[in-house]
Each structure stands twice: as structure tokens, then as C-alpha cells.
Amino acid sequence: MASSLASQNRRSRIHRGNEKDAYYEIHFNCISLFSIMQQQYDYIITGAGCAGLSLLQRMMQHSFFSNKKILLIDKDEKISNDKTWCFWEQQPGLFEDIVYHRWQQIDFYSTDFSARFDLQPYQYKMIRGIDLYSTVLNEAKQHSNIDIIYEDILSIENSSNTAIVRTKTNEFYADYVFNSIFFDDWKQQALQQKDIYVLLQHFKGWIIEISENKFDERIATFMDFRVDQNKGTSFVYVLPVAKNKALIEHTLFSENILQQHEYDAALENYIRHYLNVKNYTVTHSESGVIPMTNFKFSKGENRVVNIGTAGGITKGSSGYTFQFIQKHSENIIHALVNNEDPLHIKINANRFYLYDSILLNVLYHKKMNGDKLFAQLFQRNSVQHILKFLDNETSLKEELNIMNSVSLKTFLPAAIKEIYSIFKAKINT
């Protein structure tokens, strides 16, 4: 009764003309409502790496998204050149304007076979991380419908027909969240499953400058397997960007990564003994680890769509990711524009998963050294067919020709084993 009377008195004061109290109450309610509305978006992209920014760039280029509220969240600002992406393509791509360098010829070296290849109609291209970051983020700042926030993301969840992103200080809601962040230890999950192979592609690269004009910036060393193979399948990239400047990268396929001084020693040895360069300056260093596995990463659930490596976009047998990200992001845009579910996009035929599993079987169990395997591929196939195969774009006939170019004694048992494993898994599900 007392509560009801107090409420009546309060309403009475406002009604009698206490405009000041009424003003503050309405103002407070408007601020609260505005605050809630500010947390609601059409799309949220979590992670401002290659996958997140490739998707955002396509959204900015399509009129369908011009009136959509979009939020990009990452824990840190992208202000350093922490990555370099190299890939091949036949036509100008989404990021053609920021291609840092390109090559139309590549060299392949091994103890069994070495050759130089013309890539036409392909070009081998390099994009620096800092160029991609600055290009996309600077453009995003010009769009009033796009917000960029730098916070630690604690969790991403589904709630009925909405996805929720929680940070330390906020909750954000969206029709869809496109996530490229790992929240679980995929490696431990993979190791607990039967018939799953877990290798890592790990690398360290230096950009070096020398006083003499020794490099041919028209030709890239795609793979040089003449280096020590005792710690895993090992090769070196040499990517000249000027006559006196090149990215030298030491790469391994193995179960475990090395100590930093081991990568350094391998790079120093290669530069001195294979490039015959004694004096050089390291102007930039970068390193990374990429999954090589037939583990099936989660594509997401309901309103949360995983993208990039977190969504299984990386090719299991090679670690190549950049072009698969571009295909995936194109398909996401198509799905959203056509009111289709972006979660169930399929960018590769199932047979390519089988091929990846077969190759991983051979490498994991050391049935054939990686340098011997790649030597057979490059010696017995055109480089164009190899690149097409690595892009998962070959026909079945082309794939059979590639399979016939490697050791049948080695690959046939591995193929039978993987076909049986896939068949058994389908029956169990």
C-alpha cells in the first residue's frame, strides 16, 4: 500500500509540472536505450587477420552491406608487419593493388632433380601483412556503419537466433559472428582422435640486404630441398624483391617446432653456403606455425561461423591458406546476399580431403622423404598442374595423372588405409 501510494505521489509530481524530474527520467531512459542499441550489430568479425579482413573488404565493396551495422574486434591494433603471404593466381585478385612483388618464374631444387619453371598463366605473388592491415582498416574507418574495437574476446556463444561476443567490458550481439580465433587447443583434440595425423608447418624468415646486386628479382626459389632433412621435411624459400634484397625462409614439416637458434643456424648456413653471401644485414624477421592435419576443424554452429584456419580453411597437406580464405569469403558474401546460411558453405570436393589424408599418412609415417616426394611431383608433372592441384581445382583425370607420377608402392597402401578410415567414420556416424 505504501509502495503504491509513493508511486502515485511520484506520478502526481510529474503531472503537476515538475518538468525537471520528468526531463531527467526521460533523458536517462533514452541514454539506457541508446546504450543497448549500440551493442547490436548485423555482423561481427572477431579477429583482424587475413580471414577477417578479407571478409570485411568484400563487405565494403558490396552495396548489400552499406546499410548493415558491422563490428570488427581484435585484441590489438595491427601496426606491425608480422606476416607475409605468398600465393599464385592467374587473374588480378582482391588485393592486387597491394601486391608487393611478383614472379613469373620459379626454381625448384633437390638432390634428385632441379629445374626452372615458367609459371604462365600463373604469377607467384607476395603481400606484406602491414599493407593488407593498413589498406582494409583505413578504408573501414571511412564507413560510418563499421565500428572497430580493440579488446580481449572472452567467449562467443549462440543464443536462439543471435550470436553473442563477450569481452572484458562488453557484450555484443549480432545476426552472425564470423570468427577466426581459436578458443580451444585444436592439437590436443586432434591427438585424441584415431586416424588423425598432426604435423606442423613451422618457419622462420629473414629479409636480408646485401651490398652487391646478386639477386634476380624476376625468379623465386619456390622450394630448395638440398638442406638437412634430419629434423623433418625441410626446404628454403628465396624470394628476391630487389637485386640486393630478398626474403629467405626456412620451413619444416614435422611434429614439433625448433628452438629459435636452430632456425637461425639453418638460415645462416643457407645464406653462406647456398647463396654464397658472406656479408648481409637482417632488416626484418618473422616466424609462424601452421597446422598440417586431416583433423576436421569446427565450421561453427548456428549463428557463429568459423573462418580462416580456425574454420578448417587451411589446406591440410600443404598449409596453404591465403587463396582458400579468398574463396571462402567470396562464398560467405554470396550466401548473405542471397539469404542463405553461410555456415554450410562447401568450397572443396570431398576427394581433396582424401588426397590430403593420403599425403599426410605418407609424411607422418615417414614412408617416403618429403624431398623425394616433391622431386617426383615436379619432375613428372607440369608446374601448372601442380599449382592447380594444390589449389584443389583439378579434374579427376588430372588428379589421376598426378597420382601416377609418384611411387605406387608407397601411396597405394596409404590410399587404401585412408579410404577405409573415411568409410568406417561415415558408418559410425
Image (cartoon, grey):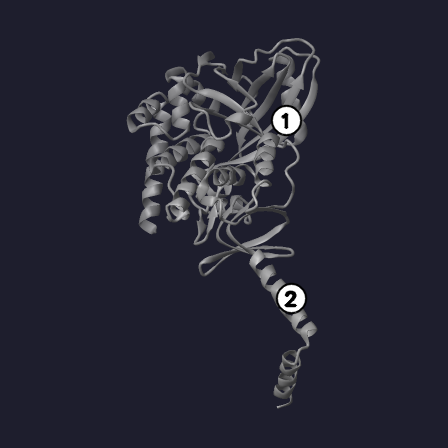
Q: Residue at x 47, y 33 (%)?
A: 364
Q: Position of residue 395 (x, y in %)?
A: 31, 28
Q: Residue at x 37, y 46 (%)?
A: 338
Crowding at dot 1, Cα within 10 Å, few <14 / some 14-19 / many 20+, comes out as many
22 shown above or below 204 = below
Depth check: give the residue in front, 389 or 105: 105
Q: Residue furthest bottom?
A: 1
Depth check: give the residue in front, 136 or 370: 136
Depth check: give the residue in front, 214 or 40: 40
**Residue 368 visible in image:** yes
Amino acid under disc 2: His
Q: Position of residue 64 (x, y in %)?
A: 44, 44
Q: Position of residue 13 (x, y in %)?
A: 67, 81
378 shown above or below 51 = above
Which numbered circle lies on residue 27? Answer: 2
Left of 77 or right of it: where is 307?
left
Q: Quadrant of the N terminus?
A: bottom right
Q: Residue at x 59, y 17 (%)?
A: 241
Crowding at dot 2, Cα within 10 Å, few <14 / some 14-19 / many 20+, comes out as few
Q: CA distance from mark 2 to mark 1?
A: 62 Å
Left of 288 or right of it: where is 93?
left
